[in-house]
Amino acid sequence: VVGASGYSGAVFTALASNHPNLELRFATSDKAAGEPVASRLGLPNGSKLRFSSHDDALKLSHDVDVVVIASSSEHAMRLAPVIAAHARVVDLSGAFRLDAAAYPKWYGFEHAAASELQRAFYGLPELFGPPPSETRIVSNPGCYATAGLLAAAPLLRDAVASADDVIIDGKSGISGAGRRADEAYSFVELAEEVRAYKVGTHAHTPEIARYLQRYAHGSAEPRVTFTPHLVPLRRGLLVTAYMVARQGATTESVRASLERSYEGKSFVRVVGIDEVSAHAAAGTPMALVGACVTGHRIVSVCALDNLLKGAASQAMQNVNALLGLPDAAGLSTYARFAP
Amino acid sequence: VVGASGYSGAVFTALASNHPNLELRFATSDKAAGEPVASRLGLPNGSKLRFSSHDDALKLSHDVDVVVIASSSEHAMRLAPVIAAHARVVDLSGAFRLDAAAYPKWYGFEHAAASELQRAFYGLPELFGPPPSETRIVSNPGCYATAGLLAAAPLLRDAVASADDVIIDGKSGISGAGRRADEAYSFVELAEEVRAYKVGTHAHTPEIARYLQRYAHGSAEPRVTFTPHLVPLRRGLLVTAYMVARQGATTESVRASLERSYEGKSFVRVVGIDEVSAHAAAGTPMALVGACVTGHRIVSVCALDNLLKGAASQAMQNVNALLGLPDAAGLSTYARFAP
Amino acid sequence: VVGASGYSGAVFTALASNHPNLELRFATSDKAAGEPVASRLGLPNGSKLRFSSHDDALKLSHDVDVVVIASSSEHAMRLAPVIAAHARVVDLSGAFRLDAAAYPKWYGFEHAAASELQRAFYGLPELFGPPPSETRIVSNPGCYATAGLLAAAPLLRDAVASADDVIIDGKSGISGAGRRADEAYSFVELAEEVRAYKVGTHAHTPEIARYLQRYAHGSAEPRVTFTPHLVPLRRGLLVTAYMVARQGATTESVRASLERSYEGKSFVRVVGIDEVSAHAAAGTPMALVGACVTGHRIVSVCALDNLLKGAASQAMQNVNALLGLPDAAGLSTYARFAP
Amino acid sequence: VVGASGYSGAVFTALASNHPNLELRFATSDKAAGEPVASRLGLPNGSKLRFSSHDDALKLSHDVDVVVIASSSEHAMRLAPVIAAHARVVDLSGAFRLDAAAYPKWYGFEHAAASELQRAFYGLPELFGPPPSETRIVSNPGCYATAGLLAAAPLLRDAVASADDVIIDGKSGISGAGRRADEAYSFVELAEEVRAYKVGTHAHTPEIARYLQRYAHGSAEPRVTFTPHLVPLRRGLLVTAYMVARQGATTESVRASLERSYEGKSFVRVVGIDEVSAHAAAGTPMALVGACVTGHRIVSVCALDNLLKGAASQAMQNVNALLGLPDAAGLSTYARFAP
C-alpha cells in the first residue's frame, strides 16, 4: 500500500491485514515512516510491519503481486506506470479515470502517461465486471461516481430513463475530504453545517458522464450536472440522481431494472427509496440503491460508506479480481456493529 | 400564540417576548398548560404568563390584535376562520397555502374553509410584499418552500431560467420534523444519517409550484420535482435548486438577478454560491442565497434557519406587517452568537 | 441469543454470526419475530435464520451449549436459572451482579433466585480470569463497571491507591441507554447536550464497590461515588476515576501497576492518560487505560465501546471461556475502520 | 475590543453591538484587519465599523471608557497595564487571575506587571459583587473556573461542604479550545470523541483553588483536583464538583445553600441536579446549578455556555458594573432560540 496513513489508505490497510488470502508486505507513509502499522491504525493482530517512506515505494513494489496506491492523483500518475511494469496496480486516485484531454481542466495537470491511461480498467465490478486478464492498472472509481453510476446506469441501460439531463446531488461525510488541519474543517465550524462546494467544478462530474455513456445506447455523452455537499457525518455518502423518465416508466419498472442489474451481487442491495440510508451503509462494504418515479422524473438514490464501497472495500474487490479470488474475499466477515 | 410548546411556536414566543412593540397576551399548550412560559422556554425576562390550554385559544383570542397559530394543519384550518372574525391571524401550518382541491392529495383532508383559503395572503415578504390592508389570514410559508422560492423565483421573473423543469433538492435539520418521541428520530439513529423521505409526496412540492407560477410569465404551472432529505443538524436548512438556463444566462447575470431582487431586503443576503451555509444562517432571521451557471443548468442555493426564516422570524415579519411595524421590528437585535 | 434486537443483543448476534467456531442457532425478538436476522442486522453472510419469539426462548435453549441473554434484569433473573439446568448462560443484564439484599434498592425488585445468584461468576476476564469449570451462569459486567474496575482495581491491588474514597465520573454515549422512543433521547434534544443522570442511584455504583473490594486487601467495601453523564456520542464510554494516592505513588509507579496487570491481555491496552480516547476505542473490543498522579490524587481513565467491551465483545470473551476457546476467538479480525 | 475575531471576542463584539447603552468604537483583529465587522460576525445592524489591526489597539484605546481584551495571556499582561492608565479594562485572558509566583508554572511565563496584578479585581459578580470604584483592571474568570466556583463556593461558605478535597471533573464543548487549524480538532477526529486533557496541568486549577479559599473560613487553600475533558459540543460546558459533606448536610440543606446564595441573581438559576443541562444553558447568559448528597459526598453540577457566562456575557456584566449600568443591560433580550 502506497499512502497508508490517509483515511482511505488506512482503511484499505486494515482490510488487507484481516484478509485470509493476502499478506501485507509494505505500507508507506511519510508522516509515520518507522512507526508500527498495527498500533497506529488500531489493528488487533500482532503484525510487526512498520510504515516505510514513500520514497521506497518503487523499490518495495518489486516483491509483491499487487500494489494499491492511495496518494495524490499527480503522484499516482507518475508512479503507477513504473510499478505496472512488474506488479499490478489498483489506484484509488483520479489519475486513470478520464480521457487525457480532460486532465488540465478537471485535475489541473497534463497527463503524462496517456497510453497507460487508455489501457487502464475502470473497476466498478457490479457494472463493468472483472478486469480482463491483461490489465495492469485498475482505476478505482471515485466515491460520488460509484454512487452516481450505481443509481443511474441500470435505468439508462434498460431505457426507463433518458440520458439527456441527469442531475446528481451528492451529500458526503467529512472524511471524504481527507485528513485536514484546517479551521474550516474543525468540529466547531462543521458540526451544524451543510453547504455545497466545487459547484460545476468537481472532477467526479466528467467521470460520471464518461462511464454513464456506456449505458446510453450510442447517444452522445450524457449531460450530467453534479453538485456535491458537505454534511456533518464522519463517514457515509448519499447521492440523489434525477433522470427524465421515459414513456411508460413506473416505480415498479424502475425497481425491476435495479433488481435485475444487481441480482446476485454481494455488495449492492436494492431497497425501497425511503430505506436508502447513509447510516445503514456506514461501516459496511454495501451500497444501498432505491428509486421511484414522480411526475416526469425518476429519483434514484444510492448510499454507501465513502471509505469502503466508495474507496477501500471496492479496491479490495478489485484486488480480489486481479488475483482470481472471490469478489467477497476478506469482506465477508465484517460486522456492521450497529448502531 | 396557539401551540407555543412545539419548536416553531416556542421560538416565535421567545421572539414575541423580546419584541419592543408587542405584548404577549396568551400562549397555549396542552402538554404544559399551567406552567410558566418563561421558565419552560428559557426566557430571561420576568414574564408571569403561564401556558393556557388549547381549548381556551378561541376565548383568549378576543382580546388581542393578532393570533399566531402553530398547530396542526387540520386544527388550524378549523380555528383560523373563527378567530379571523375578530382578530388577524398568522398561520404557520399548511392550512392556507394551496388550492382547496389540492388538500385531499397533499394533506389528507378535505378543506372546510374554502373562501378563507381563497382570501388568505401568502406571507413571503421579500417576494410578495406586505399583505393588503383587508387581510385577515396570513399563511406563513413552509420552510422548504421559503428557501426554494427565494432561490428560484427571481431567476424566473428575470427570464434567466426556464420554469419548465425545476428540481429542488432539500436538506433539513431534524428540528424541522418537530418534537418527536420516536426511535427513528433518536440521537443514536440519526447522528450519522442522511436519507431522503417523502419522495414525491411532500406537501411543499405543490406549494413551491403554485407560488413559482406567479413568476413564470403566464406559462403553465412550473414542473417542480422536490426531494427532501434529513441531515444531522439540530436546526438549519439548505435547498439546491436546479433550473434550465435560458439563452445567454451567465453566472454574472444570475447573480445580478438575485441582487436586484433582494436589494434593500433586511433578511435575504446574496453571496457567492460556496458561501451559502446552513451554519452561517442558523440562529439568525437571514436567508443566504447564491447561484451559478454550469452547463445548461443554473444551480441556485438557499440556506436558512428552519425555525426562524423558515417559520418563526418570518411569522414575526408578517405580524409586523399586519400591525404596520417595520419589517425588522423585534428581529434586529439578535446576536448570531457565533459559532 | 435471547433479546437480539436491542443494541447489545444485536451487536452480540453480529459477532456470533462471524465467529469461526460458533453456530448461531436462535435469536429471539418480540418486535421482529419472523423477520430474517441477516437483513435486519445488516449481516453480510447469507444466514437463513429468522428471529424467534421471546416466548420460545426456553424451548429453543434445549439444543444449544450456551445461551446469551440480553433482556431486562427482571426477565433474565427468572429465565437464566431455568435455562441453566441444561445450558450455560452468559447474562448481559444486571440480574446476577449484586448481593440478593441489594436488589430492592438498586434494581427495584426482590431477587427470586438467590442461590443461582450466589454461584454466578462475574465475567471480567482481565481481572477475574476464566470461570471455573462448574459455572452455569456468567454475569457479564455493566459497561461503566467494566471501565471503572479496569481503571481502579490494579491500583488498589498494588497499594498505590487507597480504597477509601473512590470517585468515578462516567461519560457514556447514547446507545448505552438502549433503543428509545422518547423525546428526551431525540437528536434535537441530545446533539449539543451533556448532563448528569441518576446521581447517587445508578445500579453500577454497588457493582463497582463490590468487585473493587476483592482488591482492597481485606478492608471494608470501598466507598464509591459514581456519577454517570450523557454525552452526545452514538457509542463510546469514558470513566475518570479519582483515588487517593498512597505514600510514594508516582505517575511512573501507577503506570507500572497498570502495565503489570494487563500484560499479555489482548483487550486492555495501557497508554498515556492523554491518549485514552473514546474515539480510538469505538468499534473495537479494546479498553484503553491510562493514569497519573496529581497532588494527593491519582486520576485513572478508561475508555471503551459501551456495546463491545462494555457488553457484546466481553460477552463473547465469556462465551469463549465457557467453551474452552481462545479469549480472542471471533474477535481478532475486526477492523477498526478508522475513522 | 482587542482580539475580536476569536470565538470569545467575536461573541462579545456581537453583544456589544446590540447593547442599548454602549457604542462599539473599535475592534481589532490581525487576520481580518480592514474587513467590515458586521458581515464577518453576521451582525444584523448596519454598523460601518471595520476591524483595526492589533497594533493600533493602544492608540485606539485613548478615546474609549472601557477596553475589553480577548487576546493571549502574555499579550494581555503587557497591554492591559498600559491601557489601564487611561481606560478601564476587562481582560478575558488568564493574565490577571493568579498570584505572580504562580505564572511560570501554570502559564509558562514570568509575570511582568505584579502591582497591577495585585490590584486587579476578579469579576465573578454572583460571588464577589461589583468591582470597587477605583478598579482599573477586571479579570474575567475562566470558563471552568466560573462553573466550578458557582457550584462549590456557596457550599463551603455555608459549611455544608469541606474544602479539604474538592474534585472537579469538567466537560467542555470544542469552541472552548478556540479557533483551530489542527487535524486533532477536525470534525472527523472529534465527532465521536471524549477524552481528558491537561490532567493536573490546566491553569484553571489554581484559579479555582485561589478563589475558593475566600469561602473556606480561614483554612488553608482548598485541595482542588481538576480534570478537563473534551466532549463533542460546539458550545456548552458542564462541571461536576465532588466535595466532602459536612456533618448533617442533606440534599435539602445543600439546595437551600445554593438558593440563598443566588437569590435575586439574574444569571444563575438553581434547579434539580438532573435538570442541569449544557443544552439548556447554551446560547444564554445563564448558569444552571444543582446539587445533592450521596453517601459522604456532595455532588454539585454547573452548566453554562463557555462563550457566554464562561466568557463574553460575563465580560459584559463586568463592563456594565464598571459603567454603573444594570447587571443585565444588553443581556436581557436574548432569545434562547430553543432548541
Image: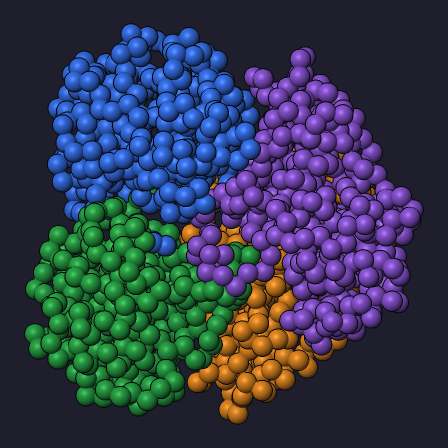
Chain colours: A green, B orange, C blue, D purple
The answer to whether residue B198 is above or below residue C39 is below
What's the residue at 8%, 77% (across, down)? A134
Looking at the image, residue C288 sits to the left or right of residue D276; the answer is: left
Q: Residue D12: image x %, image y %?
A: 74, 57
For the residue pair B160 and A87, the one nearer the viewer reads as A87
Relative vertical location of residue D190 with respect to residue A217 in this rendering, above or below: above
Residue C116 to residue D309: above or below:
above
Q: How many marks?
A: 0
Where residue B16 appears, as percent x and y from the top left, is: 77, 50
From the viewer's perspective, is C80 left or right of B312?
A: left
Rendered-image quadrant of the N terminus of chain D? bottom right
Residue B90 screen position, x and y as percent: 72, 55
Q: Position of residue B148 (x, y in %)?
A: 56, 68
Task: Please identify the residue farthest to the bottom as the structure is shown.
Answer: B248
Which image quadrant is residue A16 in? Answer: bottom left
Residue closer to the observer: B145 or D47? D47
